[in-house]
Amino acid sequence: MAIDAGLSAYAAPLGFIEAGAGTFAGAIPTILKVNSANSLSRAKEGPSQAVTGSVKDALRLGCAAVGFTIYPGSDVAYDMMEEIAEMGREAKASGLAVVIWSYPRGGTISKQGETAIDIAAYAAHMAALLGAHIIKVKPPTDFLELDAAKKVYEQQKIDVSSAAARYRHIVQSCFNGRRIVVFSGGDAKDDNSILNEARAIRDGGGNGSIIGRNTFQRPRDQALKLLDSLIRVYKGEA
Amino acid sequence: MAIDAGLSAYAAPLGFIEAGAGTFAGAIPTILKVNSANSLSRAKEGPSQAVTGSVKDALRLGCAAVGFTIYPGSDVAYDMMEEIAEMGREAKASGLAVVIWSYPRGGTISKQGETAIDIAAYAAHMAALLGAHIIKVKPPTDFLELDAAKKVYEQQKIDVSSAAARYRHIVQSCFNGRRIVVFSGGDAKDDNSILNEARAIRDGGGNGSIIGRNTFQRPRDQALKLLDSLIRVYKGEA
Amino acid sequence: MAIDAGLSAYAAPLGFIEAGAGTFAGAIPTILKVNSANSLSRAKEGPSQAVTGSVKDALRLGCAAVGFTIYPGSDVAYDMMEEIAEMGREAKASGLAVVIWSYPRGGTISKQGETAIDIAAYAAHMAALLGAHIIKVKPPTDFLELDAAKKVYEQQKIDVSSAAARYRHIVQSCFNGRRIVVFSGGDAKDDNSILNEARAIRDGGGNGSIIGRNTFQRPRDQALKLLDSLIRVYKGEA
Amino acid sequence: MAIDAGLSAYAAPLGFIEAGAGTFAGAIPTILKVNSANSLSRAKEGPSQAVTGSVKDALRLGCAAVGFTIYPGSDVAYDMMEEIAEMGREAKASGLAVVIWSYPRGGTISKQGETAIDIAAYAAHMAALLGAHIIKVKPPTDFLELDAAKKVYEQQKIDVSSAAARYRHIVQSCFNGRRIVVFSGGDAKDDNSILNEARAIRDGGGNGSIIGRNTFQRPRDQALKLLDSLIRVYKGEA
Amino acid sequence: MAIDAGLSAYAAPLGFIEAGAGTFAGAIPTILKVNSANSLSRAKEGPSQAVTGSVKDALRLGCAAVGFTIYPGSDVAYDMMEEIAEMGREAKASGLAVVIWSYPRGGTISKQGETAIDIAAYAAHMAALLGAHIIKVKPPTDFLELDAAKKVYEQQKIDVSSAAARYRHIVQSCFNGRRIVVFSGGDAKDDNSILNEARAIRDGGGNGSIIGRNTFQRPRDQALKLLDSLIRVYKGEA
């Protein structure tokens, strides 16, 4: 379906890309997701993921990039950062792009704080410092998690009131737009809200969105239509 | 006995295959079981296994595959997954198949949940994502362990009422049948129940079963007869 | 003294063999004991040993084998097993024999259980599965540590009443005699009890015994006489 | 701005130097900061940093040095020291300088003790022993943290009453001036106090100061003027 | 000063030898101290040191040996032993001598037990087993730490009443004098007590003493005179 809709890239773990290698090859750029979590893990303060793929796997499977998730705030965040730092070095030496999913959680971060604008901007900045070419974060809310951040945001009058302003702030935190930032879609919702979110991302300078269950869980023709509308939003046509 | 009965493959740890290398070689494909547990270990929430074999051992001993057990749900499940991810990479580069035993346990999984259909399907899916060619799971019951799963199974009306339906569901969770799935036999029982289980596996699209003590603990002629019946079931002759 | 008495091999840690390399070379096969414990360690549930020697050391010092102790039952038993698995692989590739001392302790094993026949047979079997050519265990008692084992031993009527029967059971647990099994001597005692123990080992199919302080702590001429008697026992002459 | 002001070197993490490689190259020596912390980490007694850069990265990006932070007193201080020891070895073999930020914290060190003169001198000495060419510490106060140190400082009449005396003491602790010592600026303040601090560093034999937010958070022309004054202080002109 | 006094060797950590490489080279053999502790560490039961130097560093700096401290009795003693075992192997392959400082502490060892004769002899023996060419211990007292040792010392009538007898016992514990044993000086004291200690070491068969603050904290001419007297003691002239 991703191929038919003309999307930019498709990300999946090792086994999935191996199983579909014959189908994907040459049809759409693939991103090998080199670490993966599952919902049976119960680590709440020190969540992590298993490293299940490698740069060599990505090259063998014809992928264009490796994708890696970090959990800023997790008690093992430094370990995750060291893993992608090392893997990113190898990826770049092999001509692959590096995509980092930066999803704050664990440690002292509250549930609401996981999508707070101050935490999200910080998390995106960390991914940029780690050398990511493409940074993926969740759409942030206007909540501010850290007291120290509240002061700075008020003092420097950083606008985080609208979705577009927040997206713009995130993009600025990634070396002022020198890095590509994309936003994940989150929970299932109707077509209109998805398209509005995409418009805000576009207006804030974001480079796109990641879409999963909002297409998989629709009938194929409706899903293709939605994807087509999304692409037109990013092209500035809708 | 395995040779005499015409079975597909025989799996054992390092020392055993070394001791029998002269007997097995060329007679039956062997799988080097590269990690092993023992019942003296008392880790209940973070169970694991010792990595005692390597791809090099498998090549030296003329094995056709490496076999590895993961414990989805264990507090050290990610560590186990990283071990087989790395070893699987090396195995594939050497032309060996990768077999993953996926046995949920540890963490917050209940005793009943270890064979629950939702957990079993998830565990089989994880093994597939890890790049297994062949996936081995225990025959699942119709119990549902996770509340979140209960909703989805009811909502999407996934049939798990019969053994065959459950086997079919597991096979679907492994990239819709693109991977080989086999089921282990469990506790000792009579010939009829063993053959019925095999019929359900066959009807559900499963690719076979693993059999151990149900043959070792029978007289040799009875065991050979049982194995012969089993093979006829999978060929659709019984 | 070992040289004068015509024994089969001499085992010691790195520094000792280095210091005596000039004396031993060519006179008696030496086993480099590659891990070592000391009595200052206070780990009771997770006892281990320090890896102080390597296969390269063994080759440099002209040793015929590497020796490694595992503690089945220890909370770090899997770690120890992984160490010898890796080192055993390298040893075999270099043409060295692998000797495993399998001494159950730690975890939930009781003091009496450390020499229980069920535990001892299981421990010997583990060493065999790990790929040992020679397995060294302590002389077992007729105590049964595990409830599950008690049932099986009674049901299958495994005779563990005499020392010879127990030695035979241990030897069977090591691939039915395809591996060499030797027994350690234990606490200091008089010549007669040592020779009787040796006779039981011989009758049970064991391949020899390890002797240390029972010779070092005797005057040289008495010790040589005892060793000579021992050798005659194993040759079936006494 | 650093380029325009004629400063000596610029230090930043991987992603930042990658993003600006085209701008910096040849214009100002850069230091790749190979480990980094973030304020979401909550480790108080065992603080550390993530190793995110390597000597190979530094060479690829044309850096003149690698920079590494150690936290003397942290419960994981030895681990950090081992990391920079290894990386420093590789850096020197590649012709790169080694800069160590030595910032005491964690363990039993009090908040006030983090900048105590005895701790600061000890921390600088540790960095020197680790093989640093350039050592960066925070400006120390006249507070003495350790009782043992109080005795020695009184007995040997070590003068720590003035800023210049303290800087001199730190420089002496680094092999009597055989190593370059620079001081970090700390919290934002006005131009005069910054210049006075620089004069004390100069008088104490220090080799310079590190400046960050005191320039970034000023208008560009004021910042450049301040930097120019600072340089004149170190040249002995102001 | 060490050069002027004609001493045998000088031991120091990486940074120090790097800083003085031009001065030392060819003038006095140097020992690279490859692990180091600092007094800010608060590990009481599991004390360790940071590995800050390597065999490659020692070769690059023209050192004659590597020096390593182990803490027998520490809860991480096995880890330290594994570090020096590996490093010692590399040192010997490169033609460097291996010096082990064996300082019991941690675990269940009492403060008094750190210099008890039974512990000291055991610690020296461990260093010998680890393959040290030169073993450095602290001068032992006649205290016996372990109950098991008390029995053996009484039974076998081992004389530990005089300093010379204790030194002799330590030397015997190191393969009966096949290894060089030196003793460290301890707390500052007057010239006479230092020379008497040296006489006892000489009479007990010890191979020398290590001296540090007893020279650094004296005026240069007095220190040189003391060192000259010490050397005459070891030559049997005083």
Image (spheres, coloured by chain):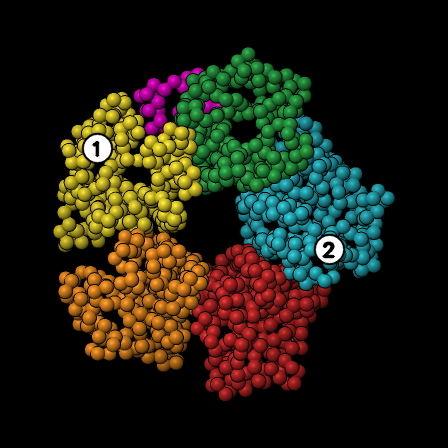
Chain colours: A cyan, B red, C orange, D green, E yellow
Picture residue at 67% right of the left edge, 57% below the top: A61
Quarter of the image with the N terminus of chain D in it:
top right
The one nearer the camera, B98 or B219, is: B98
Q: Is residue B112 left or right of residue C183?
A: right
Disc 2 is placed on an element classified as helix
Which residue does the numbered mark 2 point to in the structure image?
A213
Q: Amino acid at mark 2?
A: Arg
Local packing at callout 1 (Cα closer than 10 Å; few below 14, some 14-19, many 20+) is many
Disc 1 is placed on an element classified as helix
Badges 1 and 2, same chain: no
Q: Chain of mark 2?
A: A
**Considering only vertical position in the picture, is D180 above or below B178?**
above
Which residue does the numbered mark 1 point to in the structure image?
E231
Q: Is residue C121 left or right of residue A228?
A: left
Q: Is residue D218 left or right of residue B4?
A: right
Task: Judge whether residue C187 is colored magenta.
Answer: no
Q: How many marks?
A: 2
Magenta segment range?
D139-162
Picture residue at 53% right of the left edge, 83% below the top: B4
Q: Position of residue C111 (x, y in %)?
A: 31, 63
Picture residue at 52% right of the left edge, 18% below the top: D197
Task: Judge whether residue D141 is colored magenta.
Answer: yes
Q: Chain of mark 1?
A: E
Q: Position of residue D5 (x, y in %)?
A: 63, 21
Q: Position of residue E11 (x, y in %)?
A: 34, 35
Q: Amino acid at mark 1?
A: Ile
Quarter of the image with the C terminus of chain D in it:
top right
**Considering only vertical position in the picture, is B219 above or below A51?**
below
